[in-house]
Amino acid sequence: MYKGEKMSVSLLYISPLILISNGIRQSHDTTDKADSFMLDQSEKNIEICPYCGCQELIEAYGTDPVQYTAICNNCKANLDYHIGDKDYALIQRVGFKFKHESVLEHSLIVFEFEASRALLQELSRHRIGVSPTIKSTRYTLKELKKEKPFTWIEGREKLYKRAAKYLYMVKDDNNTVYNEVNHASIKALENLRQLIVSGFSNDKVKYALPEAYKFKGQVSFNIRSLMHLLTLRLPKDALLEFRILALEALLALPDDYRELLRQNEQLKDLEDSLRMQLTGLVDNLSKIYTVETDGFN
């Protein structure tokens, strides 16, 4: 996995795929043909774990049949999340082959993202089926007040590492973060710190934020909206930071979700191409703190 610039993607929650297959079966009145452990299993005889074959299942019932669940005593799998082969093939056929993509909206995928405000601007253009909640600069900018000045006196490497807590660092053609763009961003960060120390309100200071300033937040998708984002943000003409974040998000998904998305041929080709490109970059990551760049003072 690519770990160059300091941005991150974490998968916080993903809904079971049976919600999609159940939705499809509802439309055709074929729920009796499901081979998954569906939401309501109170009348079915569950004996064998489909993951490990264990016959020791812990069955639990709530006051409502929908709250029924079964946990494997051996592999600890929650069978609410099991998707049968027939139901999985149904999603592939209806949602991807026949392109009835509305059924894919019966899903919820929640990530935590940390990246630059430049990326946030582009993320905000994805509005259908995408719900972001972002750390507020209005309330949090005063965290800079506790920082000592961002100056070159402390040495370049220490300065860059300390600034990277707040800034997304862009690498140049030599695969190093020591370049004029990041140099300018660090100057802007110091300007922000000085404004806050001088007593200016966050509402005013945020107008001086550099595009490299990091945001952190939670972003929710359904499969359809995530697939749309990935097909637009994985191609080579997209912002590289967004391409990396999109790939990280795709790789963070469980295998059954990721293989579904790879039913989209365009998306599969884009993922494979970007993986090859980033593999070349990873080979050079050791240069990040060793390549010398002149002209900083």
Image: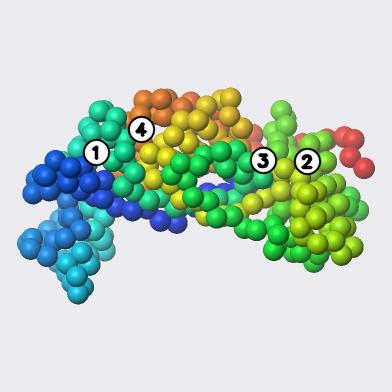
Q: Secondary structure at mark 1?
A: helix
Label located before the other in sequence (1 or 2): 1
Mark 4 and mark 3: Cα distance apart in space: 28 Å
The quarter of the image holding the C terminus is: top right
- The residue located at (79%, 37%) in the rendering is 181
Closest to the observer, 67 or 60: 67
Q: Amino acid at mark 3?
A: Ala
Q: CA distance from mark 4 to mark 2?
A: 36 Å
From the image, tell me which residue sits under label 2: 182
| Three-letter amino acid code at the position of disc 4 | Arg
Between residues 14 and 196, which one lies in front from this camera angle?
196
The vertical placement of 192 against 280, above or below, is below
| x and y, in percent, of residue 104 in the image | 32, 41
Label 1 neighbour load within 10 Å: few <14, some 14-19, many 20+: many
What residue sits right under mark 1 in the picture?
Answer: 91
Element marked by disc 4: loop
Per the image, label 3 sits on a secondary structure element best described as: helix
Q: Label 4: which residue?
A: 262
Q: Amino acid at mark 2?
A: Asn
Residue 62 left/right relative to 259: left
Task: Report the residue marked by disc 3.
Answer: 118
Label 3 to label 1, Cα distance in Å? Answer: 35 Å
Mark 4 / mark 2, whichever is N-terminal:
2
Quarter residue 204 falls in: bottom right
Q: Earlier in the sequence, mark 3 or mark 2?
A: 3
The Cα–Cα distance between marks 3 and 2, rounded to whole angstroms, is 14 Å
Q: Position of residue 296 (x, y in %)?
A: 89, 40
- Specify which label sits upstream in the sequence, 3 or 1: 1
What residue lies at 45% left-to-right and 56% top-to-bottom?
Answer: 12
Question: Contact, CB < 8 Å: mark 4 with mark 3?
Answer: no
